[in-house]
Amino acid sequence: MARIAGIDLPNKAVKISLTYIYGIGRTSALEICEKSNINPDEKMNNLSAEEVNELRKLIENEYKVEGRLRTEVALNIKRLMDIGCNRGLRHRKGLPVRGQRTKTNARTRKGRKKTVAGKKK
């Protein structure tokens, strides 16, 4: 089992296995395969140690993945919250950030329903 960027990659096609790394999607995976001259449909276990090392070096040098990328994203969100812009305020309140409706839906961001008791007269 190949290990790249701290992730154990499954024995699937290289183009699929690379997407298990945070920060690499389908397009980036195909791009990486093309740069390292590896067949994207080849199974991960069939790659030689040299090919895996080549993939590892390419990803470490040219792509921001896993911890570095997560840190950068967290710092970007923190910056938005610190300057108090609308996006930052919505992150702080736990509401959708990109203009989605909240009257209905938005349960993923808002969490479980909070029942509010009816008004007593």
Image (cartoon, grey):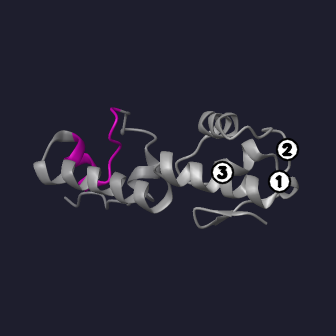
Question: Is residue 103 visible in this depiction of the protein?
Answer: yes
Q: Where is residue 22 in the image (x, y as percent from the top left)?
A: 55, 53
Mark 3 to mark 1 CA distance (whole Å): 10 Å
Furthest residue toward front: 50
Q: Earlier in the sequence, mark 2 or mark 1?
A: 2
Quadrant in the picture for residue 120: bottom left
Asked whether the residues under the numbered discs 3 and 1 touch, taking CB atoms below 8 Å apart as contact, a structural biologist would say yes
- How many marks do you count on the picture? 3
Query: If the image is split into quadrants, where does the C terminus sit?
Result: bottom left
Residue under the image location 83 percent in, 39 percent down: 41
Instruction: Residue 17: give x, y in percent of width and height.
Output: 73, 51
Indicate the position of residue 81 as horizontal and vertical percent values: 19, 52
Q: Is residue 82 magenta?
A: no
Q: What element carries label 1?
A: loop
Residue 20 seen in this snapshot: no
What numbered label is drawn on residue 55?
A: 3
Identify the residue at horizontal 25%, vertical 47% (top origin): 90
CB under 8 Å between discs 2 and 1: yes
Residue at the extreme left of the image, as rendered = 83
Question: Which residue, given by chain and number where applicable, does mark 1 sit on?
Answer: 47
Asked which secondary structure carries label 3, the reply is helix
The magenta-colored residue range is 87-99
Circle 2: residue type: Glu
Q: Does the magenta stretch include residue 92?
A: yes
Image quarter in which the N terminus is found? bottom right
Q: Which of marks 2 and 3 is nearer the N terminus?
A: 2
Circle number at residue 42:
2
Which residue is found at the position 46% from the left and 41% from the top?
A: 105
> In this rendering, which labeled residue sits more in front, label 2 or label 1?
1
**What's under tag 3, amino acid-wise?**
Leu
Residue 13 point in image, percent of width and height = 81, 46
